[in-house]
């Protein structure tokens, strides 16, 4: 079992920055991939940024050039640096951690979500 704890959300003015953190805890976590999602509309979570097992990073179009995902897998921690925030970035952000199980299957764990509000 893996538990994820997020932090770093809050209220920021347009153009400001926030850094989200996500810490995974559990025994012998075999990380396959990590990612950040946002709640979006209709409770359909959409990907914001991710890091694949080979280290490849991906970003949504809206995140490119403004957000940076990073991770320290040895410390089971990942981050999302959010710069030049815009009101449309307002949402609940979730970290997701894909873990390879003993059976070889991959299970996705979710953080509790952290609110990001961009408003003047």
Image (cartoon, rainbow, N blue to C red):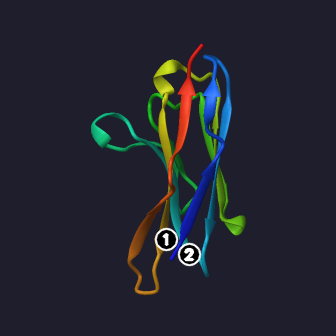
Give the label on residue 6, or none. Answer: none
- Residue at the image point whose x is 66% and y is 65% from the top: 76
Q: Residue 57, how many percent across, how many down?
A: 54, 48
Image: 8 above or below 22:
above
Residue picked out by circle 1: 99
Image: 13 above or below 98:
above
Q: CA distance from mark 1 to mark 2?
A: 5 Å
Q: Nearer the viewer, residue 82 or 116?
A: 116
Q: Secondary structure at mark 2?
A: loop
Q: Nearer the viewer, residue 80 or 32?
A: 80
Quadrant location, the C terminus: top right
Report whether residue 79 is seen. Answer: yes
Q: Residue 50, how many percent across, how many down?
A: 51, 49
Left or right for 114, reference 79: left
Q: Nearer the viewer, residue 116 or 48?
A: 116
Report whether residue 52 is seen. Answer: no
Q: Are marks 1 and 2 in contact (CB under 8 Å)?
A: yes
Pick whichever of labels 1 and 2 is earlier in the sequence: 2
Q: Secondary structure at mark 1?
A: strand
Left or right for 88, reference 40: right
> Residue extending furthest left?
42
- Residue at the image point whose x is 64% and y is 17% from the top: 15
Q: Quadrant of residue 42?
A: top left
Left or right for 34, reference 43: right
């Amino acid at each position: 079992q893996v538990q994820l704890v997020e932090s770093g959300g809050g209220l920021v003015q347009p153009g400001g920055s926030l850094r989200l953190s996500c810490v995974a805890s559990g025994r012998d976590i075999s990380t396959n991939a990590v990612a950040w999602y946002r709640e979006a509309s209709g409770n359909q979570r959409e990907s914001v940024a991710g890091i694949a097992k080979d280290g490849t990073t991906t970003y949504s179009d809206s995140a490119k050039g403004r957000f940076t995902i990073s991770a320290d897998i040895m410390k089971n921690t990942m981050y999302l640096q959010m710069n030049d925030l815009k009101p449309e970035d307002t949402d609940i952000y979730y970290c997701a951690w894909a873990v390879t199980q003993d059976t070889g299957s991959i299970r996705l764990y979710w953080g509790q979500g952290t609110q990001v509000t961009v408003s003047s």
